[in-house]
Image (spheres, coloured by chain):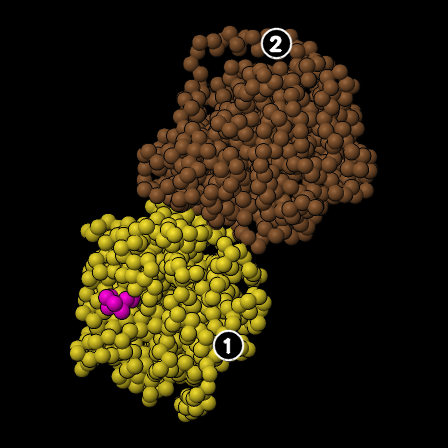
Chain colours: A brown, B yellow
């Protein structure tokens, strides 16, 4: 590990005092009139200082303009606004449009990559893409076929291209990229195809690969320092990425990295989570399966992990740990700390010290969560930091070919990719959640490169003995670990939230609504039915002194896979088709941007 | 012809005093809160008595709700509103949705026919469909593959099906149907495939075929009475549908019937026009090619023609005569008459006596029209009713393999399928027009069933020495034969207009706007950019005391075929791709309904 340590300090020296390649992005992120990054900012707070639209007038909102993307299926992510230009992306084939905000959204340029449609069936959960990124005059697109493309933001011309993965072995992409310092950091999908997850940094100007950190494998692959990389304060030790796997199963170990990325430039760290271990049949892969299901804090320059935390050792339910890490500075136990809050698929919300990796809070953010009684918070315990598994809901203990029923949450978690927002004014997190349970029957499966490597049959349904719906939109206190208010929704809320200084929180519904609620009380203040179901993330910007709110419609994603892919067998779509069948009574496929504003 | 005459009187007797199957449709058409038929009413006036939205407040219009159809490509026609239910159709695959207007547009039922996609390449001008019809508790859909389906309006269940044509010989459908009395009257497309056009009546309750009238062929096929069917007052005589053709060319003669249908129940007549003779190479088919390019007035019960008028004998430019016939009662030369006004592709607007078939007015409705100097209006002339062809623009006289340049209008005419509206308040017609010219090079082609039978290469461009745009939206005085006002548009106006008692006229643009203008002056009062280019027709209805205006977006049709079918070669799409190439700077494919209303 000497090499890695040297690398770290070497780069730290080289860059001191230098203008960063992402300086313009930082100032754009600080400017509330822009929407410069998918996540609102590096902290993933999705909070806007704009307050022209506020809780008193949001009820008057009107549709200002609209734009059809020309593509159907699930539209995740959101547009960016950089200056007077809006950048809109689409699901496969991943078209990018530059629209002129000063000229009725006229198309300045359009980039349509040529991608082999063979990649479509290799995408587990619809042909979604969570959006482009901007930095240094370039738009970065990570295509479904894992080609990373840098486009000239003004002309749409290709500046560089890099091939990040290989779809023929199941590697695809749905995530946005993290442009930071002189790098573009990208993840990979394919946990349902036995892909070994990795995170890779490319040079922002040239597209050359700078480092790659796998989720499992030898220390040199996972960029962990046995002595200095810690797990809940303890060094991870040697071979941590292989010694909790049987034989060389880590080579097809999953732990993909398809979620959201945040960063703390002062700490020189970026944060993300890893997905499920492959296969979904836990009996087939004994051990803790490190570092699947893990929160990672890595050095931006070298990729070396500073600290890690595995939330769900030896996953038995497909509770990918990829959801966003929201970075805040808050008082906890009388002390001002740098926090990281994460709403995991497994139904627990974690608040951590993002510098040290200390676990501060781990609480259920949906009371129906039943697979665990909670996390052992005693630092002196042998099982410190581990969730206590309830035997009845252990698909491992119940065994192969046994249908474990009534597990809450379902595989798509109490929350999936749909990102939460944080308002520093209320110090609350606004969380779009799923309220879905499942039956899960694991079965033995053999690995063939590029073929599904799932090994479980699922059925999903609304959480029993509850309000009958499949979702809630909640306000969460990440310090006390409590739900402040909760809005029941008929379907999962698969759209990302936006909080604003106008004390309004926005989110979309699978039926197709944009909704605005009071940040303090959750009272509904406005709703509008957009053309199709919403799985995109709400964004806001200002143009010519006027605040706008934008949202992509287009039903799809895992929850909407039945509609998106035209599936009707309830067990198809990894069990989601049956659960969300009623969606077809409310919406049809689409792909539209709707932009709202107050009347003149 | 005895047989036919007997049939007519027989039916007239049988039905006297009987309740008509279309009684409910008639009362719905009379009720301005409903939108019961694609054409607004049997007169095709597209006029609404609603005036809650009027010229003083239309500027405050807002988007009330939206719906994505789940289908891309050209969306022609409009929704219907029957009671509290809205019926929305799509292009191929011709899905029909029933939406609950009392419940945020929730989907009551969805009907998706299974159609062989092989029909798509047999459709000349995009996969459009001009909408469903309603009568007697049933929704009528005429699919692309020419299957006519009657659906139970409440449940969407199939009541009957009839196969009207054969796509393997080039027969397809894009038109709506005319539900009238106890019949559903339907047309056929395929003029670019050598189809012999026909109009067919099916029994509204059973789907049984009642009669069929071809556009050309023996008298018994064309349902013309040599003595009693007149052309400009003169009996057509025997074999009128074969004796202006060489040999049996009439068997592949074109004259398809894909346009709009109107009807005068008091006269027991319905009106429509026939399309171009096949092929587009005029040298290959000597003669007047009757009854292509003809306005037809036929008996509803028997299909027998009362009168006909061929506007463009021996077509040399593809000026299909299918555009709508707008029926009005107006004073002309001091006399109150039953009129029929028709804006032909050939650039002439015809006003006729719809009872007798007398030609009253024939004037250019775009001054750039140059292929003719006008129509001979002298009843005593040998060429009475014929347009005088300008030799320079005669593709016949210039000959095969010669490029005739600068012909105005282009093949898609001064107006194509986009229907005009009429306001009885202003006595003006509001006409969406094309302002496009062409080069036309005919070439010899041989006929193979089911294969294109076009025989000409075209290039299209904005009318030279004009405002640079490709369209105008005009107000036309059909009595004086004059343009009252004209709004220049960058692209052809391919959307149908709506006139209302609020003194507002609505239309859509290919860029995607819904526009509202002052019926008296043409001054723009409101514009909104919908998600995609508009080729649908504006409709209006009232629900819970509130007036709504609805429009389908979805770029396509002949003008938008480049975008719709992904073509880029300028000569492709029968010459439209080049002409409309700039459309891709403004809009992308879509399929959305946008519904507008005034704020509460
Ligand atoms: O393991 C993986 O590589 C992987 C990838 C993806 C993806 O790329 O979208 C999803 C998932 N897993 C997954 O488990 C999941 O719940 C999910 C939901 C969605 C979505 O966009 O709606 N994608 C994915
Ligand atoms: O001759 C025919 O059978 C036929 C059919 C159609 C059609 O079915 O849409 C069109 C035409 N011709 C045609 O000439 C034409 O300009 C046209 C435009 C459109 C349209 O929907 O935009 N269809 C058609």
Q: Residues within 10 Å of mark 1 (few under 14, many from 20)?
A: many
- Determine the residue positioned at 39% across, 59% down: B546
Residue B140 in sight here:
yes
Which chain is mark 1 on? B
Which residue is nearer to you in this view: A226 or A194?
A226
Q: Is residue B104 left or right of residue B516?
A: right
| Spot occupied by residue A140 in the image (x, y as percentages of width and height) | 47, 29
Q: Is residue A59 left or right of residue B145?
A: left
| Spot occupied by residue A69 in the image (x, y as percentages of width and height) | 45, 44
Residue B272 in sight here:
no
| Spot occupied by residue A421 in the image (x, y as percentages of width and height) | 53, 31
- Determine the residue positioned at 51% across, 7% down: A13
Q: Does the segment drawn in magenta span residue B323? A: no
Q: Does the segment drawn in magenta span residue B423? A: yes
- Determine the residue positioned at 49% across, 8% down: A14
Residue designated by label 2 = A5
Q: Is residue B357 left or right of residue A347?
A: left
Which residues are drawn in magenta?
Answer: B421-428
Residue designated by label 1 = B204
SS at mark 2 in the image: helix
- Determine the residue positioned at 61% across, 18% down: A333
Q: Is residue B163 left or right of residue B519?
A: right
Q: Residues within 10 Å of mark 2 (few under 14, many from 20)?
A: few
């Amino acid at each position: 590990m000497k090499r890695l340590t040297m690398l770290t300090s070497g780069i730290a020296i080289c860059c001191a005092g230098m203008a960063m390649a992402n300086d313009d992005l930082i100032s754009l992120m600080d400017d509330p009139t822009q929407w410069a990054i998918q996540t609102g900012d590096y902290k993933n707070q999705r909070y806007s200082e704009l307050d022209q639209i506020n809780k008193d007038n949001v009820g008057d909102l009107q549709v200002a303009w609209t734009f059809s993307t020309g593509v159907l299926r699930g539209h995740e992510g959101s547009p960016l606004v950089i200056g007077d230009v809006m950048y809109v992306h689409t699901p496969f084939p991943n078209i990018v449009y530059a629209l002129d905000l000063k000229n009725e959204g006229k198309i300045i340029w359009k980039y349509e990559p040529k991608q082999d449609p063979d990649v479509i069936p290799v995408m587990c959960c619809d042909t979604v893409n969570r959006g482009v990124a901007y930095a240094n005059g370039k738009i970065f697109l990570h295509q479904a076929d894992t080609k990373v493309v840098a486009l000239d933001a003004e002309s749409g011309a290709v500046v560089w291209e890099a091939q990040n993965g290989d779809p023929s072995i199941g590697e695809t992409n749905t995530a946005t990229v993290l442009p930071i310092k002189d790098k573009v950091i990208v993840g990979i999908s394919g946990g349902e195809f036995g892909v070994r997850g990795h995170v890779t940094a490319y040079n922002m100007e040239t597209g050359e690969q700078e480092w790659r950190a796998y989720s499992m494998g030898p220390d040199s692959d996972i960029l962990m320092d046995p002595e200095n990389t810690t797990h809940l304060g303890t060094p991870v030790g040697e071979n941590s990425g292989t010694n909790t796997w049987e034989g060389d199963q880590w080579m097809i170990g999953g732990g993909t990295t398809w979620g959201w990325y945040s960063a703390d430039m002062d700490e020189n760290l970026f944060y993300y989570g890893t997905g499920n271990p492959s296969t979904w049949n836990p009996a087939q892969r004994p051990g803790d399966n490190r570092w699947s299901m893990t929160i990672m804090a890595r050095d931006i320059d070298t990729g070396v992990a500073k600290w890690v935390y595995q939330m769900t050792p030896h996953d038995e339910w497909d509770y990918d740990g990829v959801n966003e890490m929201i970075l805040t500075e808050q008082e906890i136990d009388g002390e001002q700390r740098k926090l990281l809050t994460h709403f995991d698929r497994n139904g627990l919300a974690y608040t951590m010290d993002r510098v040290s990796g200390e676990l501060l809070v781990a609480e259920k953010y949906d009371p129906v969560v039943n697979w665990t009684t909670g996390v052992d918070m005693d630092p002196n315990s042998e099982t410190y930091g581990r969730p206590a598994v309830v035997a009845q809901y252990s698909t491992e203990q119940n065994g192969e070919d046994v249908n474990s029923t009534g597990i809450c949450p379902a595989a798509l978690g109490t929350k999936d990719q749909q990102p939460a927002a944080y308002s520093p004014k209320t110090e609350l997190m606004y969380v779009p959640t799923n309220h879905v349970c499942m039956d899960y029957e694991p079965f033995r499966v053999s690995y063939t490169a590029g073929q599904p490597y799932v090994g479980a049959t699922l059925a999903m349904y609304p959480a029993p003995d509850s309000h009958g719906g499949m979702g809630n939109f909640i306000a969460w206190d990440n310090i006390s670990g409590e739900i402040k208010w909760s809005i029941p929704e008929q379907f999962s809320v698969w759209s990302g939230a936006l909080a604003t200084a106008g004390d309004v929180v926005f989110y979309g519904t699978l039926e197709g609504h944009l909704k605005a609620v009071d940040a303090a009380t959750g009272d509904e203040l406005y709703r509008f039915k957009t053309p199709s179901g919403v799985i995109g993330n709400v964004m806001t910007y200002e143009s010519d002194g006027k605040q706008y709110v934008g949202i992509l419609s287009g039903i799809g994603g895992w929850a909407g896979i039945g509609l998106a892919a035209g599936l009707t067998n309830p067990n198809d779509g990894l069990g989601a088709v049956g659960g969300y069948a009623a969606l077809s009574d409310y919406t049809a496929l689409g792909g539209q941007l709707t932009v709202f504003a107050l009347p003149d």
